[in-house]
Image (tube, rainbow, N blue to C red):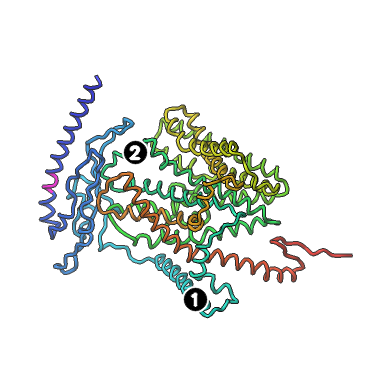
Amino acid sequence: MQLVKMLFISIFITLKTLIFIQTHLEYLKIVAKSSKMEFLSDDILYDASAKLPSGIYQGNYFDLGNFDECYNYVNTSEESPVFGKYCLGQMNTEMIHTDVSGKIENISLHSGFCLNSYCSLDDFSKIFYLHNFTEDKCHSKQTQSSILRENVFTIVIIGIVTAVVLSSTLFDMVLSYKGIETRKPIMVIFSALENTKKMFATSNSSDQILCINGIKTISIFWIIFFHEHLVWKEGPLSNRYDLPNFDEVVKNAYIFQALLAVDTFLTVAGMLTTLSMLKKKNINIFTCIIHRYLRLTPVLAIAVLMHSSILRYFGNGPCWNIVESNLIEPCRNNWWMTLLYVQNYLQPTSCCVPQSWYLAVDMHGFIVATIIIALLKKSMRKMVFVTAFITLTGIAVTYFICYGLRSTGKSNTSNIIYDSRRMYYTPTHTRFPPYMIGMLCGLFMKSIQSSRVGKCRLTQVQSFAVWSAAISFLAISTFMSLALSDETTALIALYDAVHRSIWSLGICSIILMCFTHNGGIINKFLSLKIFQVLSKLTYCIYIFHFMIIHLKVASLKTVVHFSIFDLLIDTWGSTVIMIGVAFLASLTFELPIFTLENYVSGCIEDKIIPVFCRKCGRTWKLGIFSRPKTTN
């Protein structure tokens, strides 16, 4: 019976294919005649248009034609120049495809066609009548975007900062050549020479947790690899039907679990925030939040400016609309949400700088951690209790959210991805557990330092047990989801709620082993000097990497074949470019502004505020106002 069914389906698909091919051939004949007679002043335009793509049943939905040939076409024989106009159309066919899950879907073909620039969207639809066209997928030199005011503003800002950097660098070079030490440090804050020295400075101090540098660097490379694969799925692939099989193979699970790398950064952020706050004698919550905002925002603001203005001039291509829809339009509409760090709640599915939702979570976690430590600093037990309570509450809330999403998803799959991102993936309350676990790790490390047993050595059995637990935590978080695909909704929701926390426990275990000098060769590897340099670039890499990947994929002019080898090659190539871009961004914006902020705040606290306070009859000490004591 099964054999007969398969035979029937094969015959049906074959007939549909033959009918489609015959129809398309007749269609091309009509197009060729009508195009050459009425709309095409040159055979180049017809040559640049798509024909019938091959490999449709392998997932090749695209025949892009020749974008450059069409876009660069100019006919100067008329009174005014006539340019080529390229439009990517979509044709819904009656051919069907059955994916690995048994779901049947109709095949839609995407074909690029070329007419002259006088042709409207209606003209394309009349001639290529089987296709649907939209204006965002049409490109012509005649309709190139003009320079807008925001573009000029962005260029002016970048130009001013570049001029300041060049001037400061030249001044620093002159002083270095003459052997003079400047009396005004503010003059060399923007010096590329000085900031490059800071960038490449390394340390072997045992007081620093150097293994964090390797963890951060590996995590950002993991994120790049995943986003490379994610964005490539939106590109013109010739073997799209190979992707479901690729995604379900166990050995490829490490790619899709790269989402856990974000939880690594949250865990490390929670731990470092706790350790740095506990070193302070007095904590001014407002001042700490302002410092954090000024630390994160300058580079992010430049990225927002670029996304909303000059990014549209960075390339073109048949698939350029993915840059418009994913990067440009969200920033033109929702830029203020990103700069206020509320995008993960207000517009999680279309936020400006899409990956910046993490920065909102990080900012919210920092605010909560600062408040907890400032209010409960004198009682370590209370801090542990409150932090553990928030962790468990976050896990419980996440479980109920995931259970509801899984239950709804069984009957309605159309909005499950949207709802999952809005309710589970980006909200701060579902992301709190890793950050809070990082705080608990920081509190535990502080207690170790206070008890002066930081160099305690574990026996080989104890070390093996801890490392086994750490590796088990990481493995369970990464691969357990593959074994739960057929389990009950409650069990899958439980995994969704706890696997991030389990991952964080694994990361904390590794850090603690390195911190207590039980890391061995792993600690030596994670503490390599190259990681110390690259870890300083992780923030800028995170801000700009998604844009670079989109620009690369959206600029493709031909159909490409997907394979893991090609993905690796593209990822490493992109990573080199990202490191270069991040280095420039760090030299011109991140390091100088961070140093300038510290310099200005130091001047305000040491010089301006004390003078003001003396006139008001108050004193200023470590960010705290107080009245001077009076004697009777």
Q: How crowded is mark 1: few (under 14 residues within 10 Å), some or many (20 or more)?
A: some
| Residue type at numbered disc 1 | Met
Say the numbered circle drawn on residue 606: none
The rendered magenta stretch, by its main secondary structure, is classed as helix
Of all residues, the one furthest to the right in this rendering is 632
How far apart in space, not on screen, are marks 2 and 1 (Cα)? 54 Å
The magenta span reads: 26-30
Helix, strand or loop at mark 1: helix
Tell me which residue sits at (10%, 55%) in the image.
37
Q: Is residue 392 left or right of residue 107?
A: right
Residue 248 part of the magenta segment: no
**Quadrant in the picture for the C terminus:** bottom right
Q: Name the residue under label 2.
A: 246
x then y, percent, for residue 451: 70, 47
- Which label's residue is closer to the chain start, 2 or 1? 1
Of all residues, the one furthest to the top in this rendering is 1
Residue 336 seen from this side: no
x then y, percent, for residue 476: 49, 35
> Marks 1 and 2: in contact by CB < 8 Å?
no
Q: In this view, does 496 lie to the left or right of 75?
A: right
Helix, strand or loop at mark 2: helix
- When asked about the image quadrant of residue 48, the answer is bottom left
x then y, percent, for residue 45: 16, 57
| Residue type at numbered disc 2 | Phe
Of all residues, the one furthest to the front in this rendering is 460
Q: Mark 1 points at which residue?
A: 173
**Quadrant in the picture for the N terminus:** top left
Tell me which residue sits at (13%, 60%) in the image.
42
In this rendering, the answer to whether 410 lies above or below 63 is above
